[in-house]
Amino acid sequence: MLARERQKRLAAAMAEAGIDIVVLYGNAWQGDYLRYGADFGILEGHGIALVNADGGVELFLDSATDAERAELEAPAVTVHLAPDIARVVGARLDRAANARIAAAPRRFLPRWLADATRSFKLDDATALLDKLLMHKSAGEIAAVRRAAEIADEAYVEFLRMVRPGRRQFEIVADLEAHLRRRGCPDNFMIIGSGGKDVLGMTPPSERRIAVGDLVTTELTPAVDGYFAQICRTLVVGKASEAQRRAFGVFVEALEAGIAAVRPGVRAADVAKAENDVFRKHGLGEYTTSQWTRVRGHGMGMFADSKPHILEDVNTVLEPGMTLIVHPNTYHPDVGYIVLGDALAVTDTGAEVLCRTPRQLFEVAA
């Protein structure tokens, strides 16, 4: 049902823009543009989908494994195995050189395809697809909402799995197994553990959990191809007064950011609301790019999509967008702390999708 919705919305947008064929690129890291039009989640290699104005879709994949899977998972799509994917797609577009063709995201396409000497011209349809990806239907928001429920459940499991002596990768592997048993085929997750020496989160390492550690994570499971994220921090043992005091700043910043979310405000306004809390507490330095990347971001068919919540991003929030607000950054007294909730922009403000308490959790030492 969601795939049909997306197909209709894409066809309408193409007709309005006068586009005959849209070229959608995806890879194993970011496949949301490709999946929007082809209803296929790429796991390895590169993929390019050609979506015609009449709704027909051809999918070109350079991975034999993914091509075989696509035959089963996307029966309405014509699948081609193409190890030399750029030239095969180019030959197909040569036959449609008189049509108006546009690509998204154009900047990610193989350079050979985008070369101006080709017989066809590729306009840039990135903004068109970005709008479709950001502005979700009720069915898409329902999928994000279900993913947020799974994220809440998974964090309860995470609390049970963290204990002294365990290595980061063991915890993440156990949680991945839990999510697979719940029927969740995809999850983006990073983790951090330690004290003032830890400057952020990374993929899981060999590092062992120790008493007194702050343990941070971003949990981002997907349902029907739609991601939702939760960010939380725990302490192994009893939290110190310094840790509690520092965490209080993050709670205040998160609440300020969420309170700023409503139709008509800019992503920049949400970021400023969060950052102003840190500035008030004399921590403005830690809102800069030296210490943190974003103050939140969009969610949907990619775990880290537009709009990015930064003070220089002027994207206007509208009903139907789904975001995570997270004032994640380093605190000079205790180390890196994370706290963030997924939400949907409504007609009047924000619907918070995460239900996990905003507290500094303690697990037994």
Image (cartoon, helix red, strand yellow):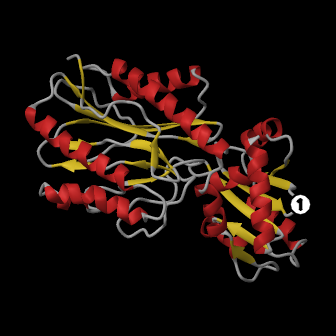
Pinpoint residue 167: horizontal percent, then vertical percent: 33, 25
Kindly indicate the quadrant of the structure image that contains residue 91.
bottom right
Residue receiving disc 1: 54
- Report the label total: 1
Residue at (53, 25) in percent of width and height: 179
| Residue lying at the far left of the rendered structure | 241
Q: Nearer the viewer, residue 296 or 48?
A: 296
Residue at (26, 32) in percent of width and height: 359
Q: Quadrant of the N terminus?
A: top right
Q: Is residue 222 left or right of residue 45?
A: left
Kindly indicate the quadrant of the structure image that contains residue 56.
bottom right
Pinpoint residue 193: horizontal percent, then vertical percent: 26, 34
* Label 1: few (<14), some (14–19) or many (≥20) C-alpha neighbours in 10 Å: few
| Residue lying at the far bottom of the rendered structure | 117
Kindly indicate the quadrant of the structure image that contains residue 365.
top left
Q: Nearer the viewer, residue 63 or 326?
A: 326
Q: Nearer the viewer, residue 128 or 84?
A: 128
In the rendered view, tell whether residue 3 sits above or below residue 235: below
SS of the residue at dot 1?
loop
The type of residue carrying mark 1 is Asp
Q: Is residue 304 left or right of residue 232?
A: right
**Residue 61 appearing in the image:** no
Residue at (46, 24) in percent of width and height: 153
**Residue 323 appearing in the image:** yes
Pinpoint residue 25: horizontal percent, then vertical percent: 68, 59
In the rendered view, tell whether residue 149 sits above or below residue 137: above
Q: Is residue 32 left or right of residue 93?
A: left
Pinpoint residue 188: horizontal percent, then vertical percent: 49, 39
Q: Nearer the viewer, residue 199 or 355?
A: 355
